[in-house]
Image (tube, helix red, strand yellow):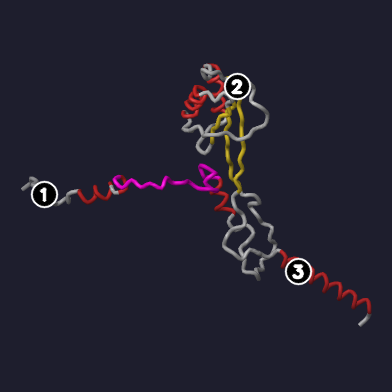
Amino acid sequence: MPIASTRKLAGVLALSLGVTLSACGGMPTNRGLESIRQPVVERNNFAFDVKAAASGLSIAEQARLADWFDTMDLRYGDRISIDDPMMSPATRDAIAKLAARHGILVSEGAPVTAGYVQPGEARVIITRSTATVPGCPDWSEKSDMNYNNGTRSGYGCAINSNLAAMVANPEDLITGQKGTGETVVTTSTKAIQSYRSQAPTGEGGLSATASDE
């Protein structure tokens, strides 16, 4: 065989081998059933300073704060905390009443925020968490071969993205809701007792009805 033909054949074989190896590189590598695309919870703090005195907040400051709550669309899952150097109970009570209109309770303590709270002011902080699934959808795999018997790169994207979008409180994806550990027996068995004490429908016999002759 001529030398030129040999070199040409070797080049074709090398190109075919390179294409094959690149296709193998796109095969799934996750051999478990746990998706590699998991929700990521991000927490952000939003601060709003109000003028506060020992007697609490003025009507004008309460109106400003109420408008801010409406603008921020305060909702379930948000956490409200107060950074008040004077630690005035009246200020806390005024803020708590405004937050209660949105069904939110004021939490104890406050996260660290940028800057200082000026004298005669209090800082109201909304801590909001959001959940997303980075990298979804994932169509990075270019090969139909699956020698590793693994799950696809986009496996779990749909259900985890929907879960992240629908969960009311994204913090539940991290720690979940904690119970009190107490069980009220009288409440938990109320439905069972009602079912057992109910008289059978046919206990009184059949009711007499007039029939047409």
Is disc 1 surrounded by few (<14), some (14 to 19) or many (20+) residues within 10 Å?
Answer: few
Residue 211 showing in the rendered view: no
Residue underneath mark 2: 121
Kind of residue at disc 2: Glu
Secondary structure of the residue carrying tag 1 is loop
Residue farthest right in this picture: 3
Task: Answer left or right for 9 relative to 41.
Answer: right
Q: Residue shown at 58%/40% (left/top)? A: 129
Residue 23 drawn at (x, y percent): 73, 66
Residue at the extreme front: 86
In the depicted structure, whether residue 209 falls above or below residue 151 = above
Using the numbered discs, state the Cα–Cα distance from disc 1 to disc 2 in whole angstroms. Answer: 73 Å
Mark nearest the camera among 2 and 3 is 2
Q: Nearer the viewer, residue 211 or 200?
A: 200
Residue range corresponding to the magenta coloring: 165-186
Amino acid at dot 1: Gly
Membership of 25 in magenta stretch: no
